Amino acid sequence: MLSDDEAAELLSFLTPTTRPDVKGRATEYILGLSGHRDGCRFLCSKPDVISALLVLTSDPSIAIVKDCFHVLINLSADETLHQVLVDKVKVLPVLLKNLVDPDYVFSDQICTILSNLSRHEKTCWTVFKVLQEQLGVAQLVEIFCTEGYNQRAKLHYLGPLLSNLTQLPEARNYLLDPDRCVVQRLLPFTQYQASVVRRGGVIGTLRNCCFDHRHHEWLLSDAVDILPFLLLPLAGPEELSDEENEGLPVDLQYLPEDKKREEDPDVRKMLLETLLLVKTSTLQSEHVLLLSSSLSVSSPADGHQSWPTDAEGQERLSHHEGVPPLGEGRPRRCELREAGPGSDRRRTGSRDGEPDGGGDT
């Protein structure tokens, strides 16, 4: 690692007025440092360096800005460094200000950082507080639900961010406020095929919201009608009898032969967890039992997606620390990424490509 004198010299290169080629070499070197845990912790012992990188996220050079955001993604992947980023460097106001800009090129990187920082409850509180002060959950949901809000970014990681925020009772109360009609806007994304990250983030949000049992009656009522949105992704192409179809919600009756069941096993597990949380309602229990009995578990040889066994599901969810039994415990963070479960993948010191994601899950 660098000595104090070397770190001070490196910091002198991280100014807006430094020659672009010198800044580029400096940010590239720091990106390499952030590719492993020791390097990240060294950088967090130098908050002035991180603050300088935050300033350079407004640099005219796209390559320099990309390096800076990739460093912040790597740092935010380590929960032990969150307090430094949030309290000492104060990255949140800058990130949220740029997130609302519909033309900002690096909004996806911002979503990833925010998703990482909100994974653990302590810093999630801080993210929620600053979000409410500067942006508000209402505007965050509006951005998420507006297709093409940012033509230069996909914003899929706003899904895991919402899921992480619903660890907090205040966030759940806002989403479940009958006068706001917020949770209803999220329901169609349970079958959003363009991104498992966005789809899984919404399902994780619904799962966390269902830990508040007092809202179950409202969620199952015609005002929300959450049940078909939870059951439809689990339905496959199996042919049901007329009697079985009549016992299902209208949206699940007589599905086409090409209907595909949710392919991601972790998303399927979250759907089942959500169903188990709301199983106390007699009406929905009948639907769940009927669907479970009528959907056969086909083997891969039959050409259908097989459901994971308990052992398989546990293995794939092993990154969740202290996962409670289904239907028990408390709301959990979302740790999804495009390549599978988990939101804390760390980049190597390379400029090539986009970040793998740092952000529920």
Image (cartoon, grey):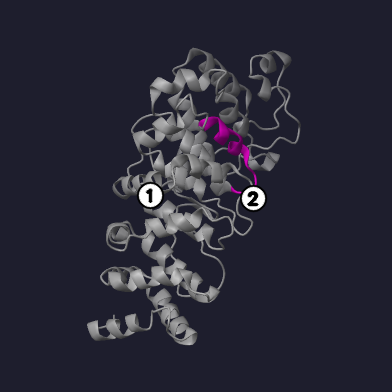
Which of the labelled discs sits on residue 118, or is there none? 1
Which one is closest to the eye, mark 1 or mark 2?
2
Residue 180 appears left or right of 74: right
Residue visible at 68% across and 14% down in the picture: 246
- Residue 283: horizontal and vertical position, in percent? 53, 14
- Residue 211: horizontal and vertical position, in percent? 39, 29
Q: Report the span colored magenta.
A: 183-195
- Residue 103: horizontal and vertical position, in percent? 59, 59
Quadrant where the N terminus lies? bottom left
Q: Give the quarter of the image for residue 311.
A: top left
Residue 321 vertical placement versus 15 (above, below): above
- Residue 93: horizontal and vertical position, in percent? 39, 56
The amino acid type of the residue labelled 2 equals Gly
* Residue 56 covered by magenta stretch: no
What residue occupies the far right of the structure in this picture? 257
Residue visible at 52% across and 58% down in the picture: 107
The amino acid type of the residue labelled 1 equals Ser
Q: Give the quarter of the image for residue 247.
A: top right
Q: CA distance from mark 1 to mark 2?
A: 24 Å
- The local secondary structure at tag 2 comes to loop
Per the picture, the main secondary structure of the magenta-coloured stretch is: helix
* Residue 185 covered by magenta stretch: yes
Q: Which residue is mark 2?
A: 148
- The local secondary structure at tag 1 comes to loop
Quick check: marks 1 and 2 in contact, CB under 8 Å?
no
